[in-house]
Image: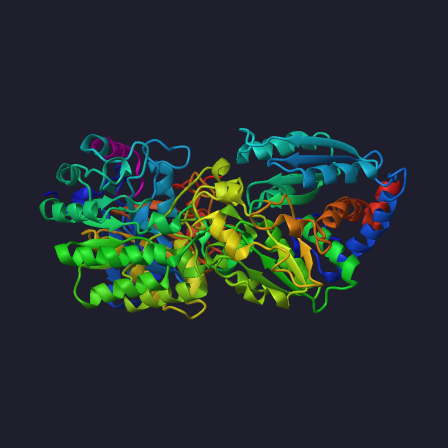
């Protein structure tokens, strides 16, 4: 295991599978009445969120608590703390608590990597700007692996606003690493030039969507757009919205949430039995438990320290 | 109008009395490429002789420079000395100390300071400070538009009379073609080069690096090549129409080189510069998210880099310019998107080019040496030459010396060098500028020489002399 989880590039296929296998056993814990194991008792985990988050922050919170860690959660959305120098100061301050891990979400690419250089704690990237969101990708692979057994040869289409999506970047890397074929599809203004270098195909038209085994729809990121990338949401929805009419039988539907109902997904699709959206959320806790465990306990050397 | 040499400003320094013994003199313009003794008297090159043929001056010293190279000192037409107003990044003393340490005998400073150098009064006070603080001669450009705002011309004629070598809104493009056209028309009255930072803000948007596969991977907003090249093409057309003299600053992409070549081919009076970082690095290094690699224009692809090198070789690109852009630590130790744009470059320019381009066989040493001082003539300044009667403007370089960039700190006040930590060859040992010794590297020579004729090995006499690099 790497010391930090900043990018999917930190993990090879074996590393991903190890985390997913571990997550399977934690998913079993989550099914018990007492959903707690003592793995991280006495250790401190800091959740530092510089950006709004419901799913990710709550599931990291729960994951740490179910591993019996002491959790400090700090949110400073849109505050003046969100400046580089004070990020460094904040990390130095928090380091005084001697945390075992710092989970950080930031609107800025590379923030988690910088933090890793300033602390002796393990750093987990919970989203850095438009760069990466590796635990989302891991929980998506986990969800698909549970449903399909394996991803080898699976055709996955990622549809929508790829330009502003860290989920897309981490997922392209994770899906292809697990043997899937990825196609990204969206308006040309929202597909970054050069995206094929990540190992996917890119297309502006949704006509061949029926070829997909899995349709992964991205959230339209209004909040990251400082200019108009599509002429109108109405036209966008007409061209790219995934509804039950566009879905073929047997295709699986995923979305990282939160959904803009009626924009990238129709209401009937969200509620259809093909949708795995609820399972994705549920997988979040188990996968994040597994990430914390593997980074902090999993390696034999660290395990010895933990026991001692 | 003031004579060009009177538009360089520096503090007084004693004229050198010095014999440089047995240096390999390479001055491509003088067709010199062999070992010589160089005798410097009263700051001028008094004699060039066969190796070990000249006596040391009476009141001076002799340096054994066998195995070392002597080049005409370099001239950098594009540096940011951050004075006035941003002295926490750099000032005239530290910036010119960096220049001296890099082998430069003159630099031209950009006006995007705080306040902007857009009035003769500000220009005058800057000149006064340079006369007190600058270790090597400094020339200054004034801004084209007031406060770099792009909507009102500065008093260009007054600024030219005050000593401005030319005009630039560097850091920003002159977005309005109409505004630039007026400046080019006004050039007929006031002279001076109009130097342009080319970037269409509508295309570069919020970009922080080159737009391409690497920006797609990192999720960073990209600055497309066409943001620069469309403006080069536009402004070359304007220069042709007004028969103006225009210099394109820090070219970064193949399309810009092509646009410059096309304009030159039809006789437009245009010139161009490229920086050591654009000539040696590509956007691939940005994968590290190290903010030292964040600059504007951004590092581009290998195709672009090769086009710049070829442009420099063929002469389409006239000269090398470092775009030395110091920033304080706190402005760089932040996430990439928030970091200030720019890299320092004066202290590493020659070594980076020598290591990455000459040693790799991409460019000849003579070409690099020639292009390192070719910026002078573009601004009407005298070109340094190693010839009898010339003012001593030369540098002594050990091409074999390998060093790690930053290992001894920097002479610059800032440490944001994109070559930091890299192993480079080609160390500047000694710089003479305007007839004075302005830099001498302490602890230079690997082994003491045993020469008996009164020549001191460089290392043995170096301690305590000259401005060494500060920690």
Task: Give the magenta part as a residue range.
Answer: B124-139
Residue at image coords 37%, 33%: B86
- Quarter of the picture containing the N terminus of chain B is top left
Is A268 part of what is drawn in magenta? no
Q: Residue B342: image x %, image y %?
A: 42, 46
Is B130 part of what is drawn in magenta? yes
Q: Nearer the viewer, residue B95 or A122?
A: A122
Q: How is the image coloured?
A: rainbow
In the rendered image, is residue B256 in sight? yes
Q: Is residue B304 above or below residue B465?
A: below
In the rendered image, is residue A255 in sight? no
Q: Residue A180: image x %, image y %?
A: 68, 65
Q: Residue B162: image x %, image y %?
A: 16, 37
Q: Nearer the viewer, residue A113 or A92?
A: A113
Report the magenta stretch's main SS: helix
Q: Nearer the viewer, residue B386 or A285?
A: A285
Q: Is residue A21 above or below residue B79?
A: below
Quarter of the view holding residue A57: top right
Q: Residue B65: image x %, image y %?
A: 38, 58
Residue at image coords 51%, 60%: B213
Residue at image coords 20%, 58%: B237
Left/right of residue A207 with respect to residue B282 in the rendered view: right
Tell how many labels: 0
Farthest right residue? A33
């Amino acid at each position: 295991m790497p010391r930090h989880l900043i990018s999917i590039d930190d993990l090879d296929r074996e590393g991903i599978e190890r985390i997913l296998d571990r997550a399977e056993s934690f998913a079993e814990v989550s099914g018990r009445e007492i959903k707690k194991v003592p793995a991280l008792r006495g250790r401190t985990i800091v959740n530092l969120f510089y950006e709004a988050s419901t799913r990710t922050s709550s599931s990291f919170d729960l994951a740490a608590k179910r591993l019996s860690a002491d959790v400090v959660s700090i949110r400073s959305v849109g505050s003046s703390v969100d400046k580089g120098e004070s990020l460094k100061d904040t990390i130095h301050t928090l380091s005084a608590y001697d945390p075992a891990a710092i989970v950080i979400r930031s609107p800025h690419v590379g923030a988690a990597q910088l933090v890793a250089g300033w602390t002796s704690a393990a750093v987990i990237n919970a989203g850095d700007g438009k760069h990466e969101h590796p635990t989302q990708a891991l929980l998506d692979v986990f969800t698909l692996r549970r449903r399909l057994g394996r991803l080898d040869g699976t055709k996955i289409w990622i549809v929508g606003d790829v330009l502003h999506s860290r989920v897309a970047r981490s997922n392209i890397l994770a899906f292809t690493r697990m043997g899937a074929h990825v196609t990204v599809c969206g308006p040309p203004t929202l597909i970054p030039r050069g995206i094929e270098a990540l190992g996917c195909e890119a297309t502006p038209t949704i006509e061949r969507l029926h070829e997909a085994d899995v349709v992964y729809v991205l959230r339209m990121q209004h909040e990251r757009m400082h200019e108009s990338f599509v002429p109108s949401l109405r036209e966008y929805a007409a061209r790219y919205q995934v509804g039950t009419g566009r879905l073929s039988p047997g295709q699986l539907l995923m979305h990282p949430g939160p959904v803009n109902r009626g924009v990238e997904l129709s209401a009937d699709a969200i509620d259809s039995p093909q949708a795995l959206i609820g399972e994705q959320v549920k997988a979040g806790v188990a996968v994040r438990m597994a990430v914390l465990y593997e980074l902090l306990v999993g390696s034999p050397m660290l395990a010895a320290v933990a026991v001692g | 109008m003031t004579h060009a040499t009177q538009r360089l400003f520096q503090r007084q320094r004693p004229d050198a009395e010095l014999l440089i013994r047995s240096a390999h003199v390479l001055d491509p313009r003088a067709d010199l490429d062999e070992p010589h003794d160089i005798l410097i008297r009263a700051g001028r090159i008094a004699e060039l002789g066969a190796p070990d043929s000249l006596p040391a001056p009476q009141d001076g010293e002799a340096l054994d420079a066998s195995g070392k190279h002597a080049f005409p000192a370099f001239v950098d037409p594009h540096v940011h000395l951050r004075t006035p107003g941003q002295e926490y990044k750099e000032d005239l003393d530290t910036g010119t100390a960096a220049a001296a340490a890099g082998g430069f005998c003159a630099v031209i400073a950009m006006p995007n300071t705080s306040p902007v150098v857009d009035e003769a009064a500000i220009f005058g006070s800057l000149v006064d400070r340079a006369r007190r603080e600058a270790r090597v001669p400094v020339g200054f450009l004034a801004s084209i538009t007031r406060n770099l705002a792009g909507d009102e011309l500065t008093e260009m004629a007054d600024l030219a009379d005050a000593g401005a070598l030319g005009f630039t809104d560097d850091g920003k493009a002159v977005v309005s073609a109409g505004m630039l056209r007026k400046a080019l028309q006004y050039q007929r009255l006031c002279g001076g080069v109009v130097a342009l930072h080319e970037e269409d803000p509508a295309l570069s948007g919020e970009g922080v690096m080159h737009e391409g596969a690497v920006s797609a991977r990192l999720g960073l907003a990209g600055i497309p090549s066409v943001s620069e090249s469309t403006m080069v093409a536009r402004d070359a057309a304007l220069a042709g129409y007004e028969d103006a003299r225009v210099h394109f600053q820090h070219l970064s992409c193949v399309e810009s080189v092509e646009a410059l070549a096309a304009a030159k081919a039809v006789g437009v009076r245009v010139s161009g510069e490229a920086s050591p970082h654009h000539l040696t690095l590509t956007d691939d290094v940005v994968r590290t998210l190290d903010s030292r690699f964040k600059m504007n224009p951004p590092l581009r692809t290998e195709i672009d880099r090769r086009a710049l090198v070829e442009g420099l070789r063929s002469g389409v690109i006239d000269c090398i310019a470092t775009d030395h852009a110091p920033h304080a630590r706190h402005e760089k130790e932040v996430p990439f998107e928030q970091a200030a744009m720019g890299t320092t470059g004066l202290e590493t320019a020659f070594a980076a080019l020598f290591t990455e381009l000459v040693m790799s066989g991409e460019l000849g040493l003579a070409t690099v040496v020639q292009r390192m001082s070719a910026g002078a003539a573009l601004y009407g300044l005298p070109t340094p030459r190693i010839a009898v009667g010339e003012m001593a403007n030369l540098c002594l370089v050990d091409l074999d010396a390998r060093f790690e960039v930053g290992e001894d700190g920097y002479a610059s006040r800032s440490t944001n060098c994109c070559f930091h930590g890299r192993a480079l060859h080609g160390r500047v040992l000694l710089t003479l500028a305007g007839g004075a010794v302005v830099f001498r590297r302490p602890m230079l020579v690997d082994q003491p020489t045993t020469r008996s004729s009164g020549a001191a090995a460089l290392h043995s006499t170096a301690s305590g002399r000259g401005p060494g690099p500060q920690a």
